[in-house]
Image (cartoon, coloured by chain):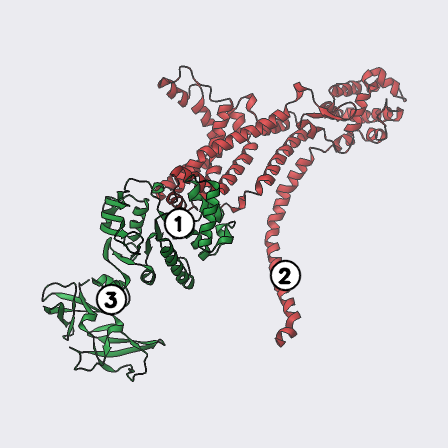
Chain colours: A red, B green
Amino acid sequence: MVEEAVSGTSLLKKLRRTERRKKIEAVGLITPLFVLMLIFYFIPIGLMLYKSIDNSQMREIMPHTARAIEHWSGKGLPDEPVYTAIVEDMKVAYPNRTLAKAGRRLNFDLVGFHSLLSKTGRKLRKLKGPPYKEALIKLDKKWGDPRYWTVLQRGLKNTTLIYLLATLDLRYDDKNNITHVPDEQAIYVSIIGRTIYISIFVTVLCLVIGFPFAYIMANATTRVRNLMMIGLMLVFWTSLLVRTLSWILVLQNKGVVNSILMWAGLISQPLDLVFNRIGVYIAMTHVLLPFMVLPLFSVMSGIPSYYVRAARSLGATSIVAFFRVYVPQTKPGIGAGCLMVFIQALGYYITPALVGGPKDQMLSYFVAFFVNERVNWSMASALGLMLLLITGSLYLILGKHVSITNIKLN
Amino acid sequence: MKTDDVHVSFKNVQKSYDGIKLVVKDLNLDIGRGEFVTMLGPSGSGKTTCLMMLAGFEPATQGEIMFDGRSINNIPPHKRGIGMVFQNYALFPHMTVAQNLAFPLEVRKMEKAKIDEKVQHVLDMVEMGEFGDRRPAQLSGGQQQRIALARALVFDAELVLMDEPLGALDKQLREQMQYEIKNIHEQLGVSVVYVTHDQSEALTMSDRICVFNDGIIQQAASPDDLYERPENSFVAQFIGENNTLTGTIDTLHDGLADVTLESGEKVSAAAIKVGKVGESTMLSVRPERVIVNPDESKVPFTIAGHVQKLIYLGDHIRCRMTVAGNDEFIIKMPNDSEDRLLAVGEDVRVSWKPEDCRALDVI
């Protein structure tokens, strides 16, 4: 005891020193991975997502206007300095061809802005002034319409919400209030809804097929189990593109399925199985099935057979024993499998693009569309952010009940 | 407790899993109502298979199993109404203790109020009244064992099967649970079929023990009969400690056999399972029945022994010696005050009463 009291403080120090060394080692080991993740994962994704609200480009194109219009009250028309500023900006931007960029951007908020700017740009040299206010309104009476100035003021702020609002079929009205877009333009909410619906449907299909599959696999002999595992893994060994295209071959009008059904006399005309929703369901379920089966199998192979026996000996029929004793114990597997399949299904792009029709495209298709066709990165990243939000909130809700990290794949 | 009323009866039951080897060979056994029968044997001897056939999880390949006078061969397990306690307890991990106990009653469509009452009653019976809301994982091994027992009893099963229920418990707890199971058995008067490979457990608890080996009941008898009067060499060696000596039969008379050991010495033993004169036999004598340095006039024979090792165990002294060529001959001597302590290396004479030594089959 005496010895302990004397050396007490130094003991604590020693302990801390050894602990510190361990900590430094641990941090040292993690750092490279962390830096790698930061550089190649978090920062690019963060930048990409920032694009959905980023508006700084507009300020670069029209620096004078941006400063001058900041103080405009939004009532009536702006004063002369704002008109002067925009003419100055256009004089630089038109020859640089950046004016068209600004026009496209503003056109997204108010249709007609693009043509207004290009028309004004063309006739800029003939414009007399200063003052420019009268001259501009004379050139095109849209310059005398306060709606355009409201949009311009909104469009010259550092950040903008128009893309995010657009993904929810919302927009600013003339008075800067958020309203619904007209019904004929509202598409994104229904696309998000369709994406979620298809994902849920595919998840359910995967569960319905995957549960019995995993059950048989977990209770089979080693030989059969290995065969089933190989069959399942085969899906991973072929490219997604090849798998999806082969479904087209199988399901098309003169494909294997239709040929067999017609040969058997079950149908007289080929069924439409591909380039529609049915094709999307079939192909996506096939691709995602392993992600349902593997966690289920992992959980099921850990459930000893004596539970069902015990239930039987206690008077339960095999059906009651299965549903009241066996199935509840597979809940962690069901949860993890559904979460994995659902989250992956949400982001599916190639499969619906290849085997689906125009009404079966999911959110990711529109992300690609905005990147490749429209070159509108802001809209693409806004849609991406929506996808991330759906996934994130789902994970937060279900994550409490399902621990993915608990699942081990044998 | 024991009555003549037959509760369960195996009739010429055989079981094979692969169609080649019989795991259970021609089992015939009657279990009386209220009897506590233990199936004891090494692993792979067929005892658990018998239990599984009785529970209904394995079909009998041949023969008939009668329960309450009717054949249950074609009755599925859930309709047999036989309670079962599993080796690993098999408490449903996703249900609370009370839900576990209510399960057999719910599947029997009992009323809610009646269920609650019965669950509480059976919880009190195993002295776990406060634990209804716990999950099985929150209980200790002994507590889980009690709940498993309670669950097998809650639906008023008249027959309870137990498959090595105490195997996972430590020694002290196991002894306590043996006592409690025995108590509950006596209180409720249910019939119990108990499977174990632990002979002391079997001896402590059972009314009757069936010793299994190689798919055959070697002997079915009360614990004392089994220990005192084993009917063959397997039982003699399986139950308790035993010294074996082999020899040839010289004469057979009055239920006794005179035997010449391999060393040439002549001894006498009770003839239990022997062939004809001139055939070989295996003698079996318990360590505590061997007499050391007897008064030569009072015993029919003595043979030579050479003390190899002495182990002091407090209440008795264990002595390993060489007798008739057997180096593992054990003698237990009570630690009384009489002056007959042996020394290592000493040559002694040993003997036994002929009725304490059993001449059995050679294995």
* Local SS, label 3: helix
Image quadrant occupied by the C terminus of chain B: bottom left
Amino acid type, mark 1:
Leu
A120 sits left or right of B337 in the view = right
Task: Give left or right: position of A371 versus A65.
Answer: left
Quarter of the figure that contains the N terminus of chain B = bottom left
Element type where label 2 sits in the image: helix
Q: Nearer the viewer, residue A36 or A281?
A: A281
Spatial separation of the CA atoms under disc 1 and disc 3: 34 Å
Q: Nearer the viewer, residue A191 or B67?
A: B67
Classed neighbour count for the residue bearing mark 1: other residues with Cα under 10 Å, few (<14), some (14–19), many (≥20) = many
**Residue marked by disc 3:** B228
Q: Residue at the location (42% across, 19% down)?
A: A254
Q: Which disc, if any, is residue A20?
A: 2
Q: Which residue is mark 1?
A: B153
Task: Give the number of the disc on residue A14.
Answer: none
Answer left or right for A267 relative to B346.
right
Check if mark 1 and mark 2 are on a common chain: no
**Which tag is nearer the camera, tag 1 or tag 3?**
1
Q: Are marks 3 and 2 on the same chain?
A: no
Which three-letter amino acid code belongs to the residue tagged 2?
Answer: Arg
Between tags 3 and 2, which lies in front? 3
- The residue furthest bottom is B339
Q: Residue at x 52, y 40 (%)?
A: A336
Evaluate if marks 3 and 2 touch, with contact meaning CB atoms under 8 Å apart.
no
* Secondary structure category for the residue under label 1: helix
Q: Nearer the viewer, mark 1 or mark 2?
A: 1
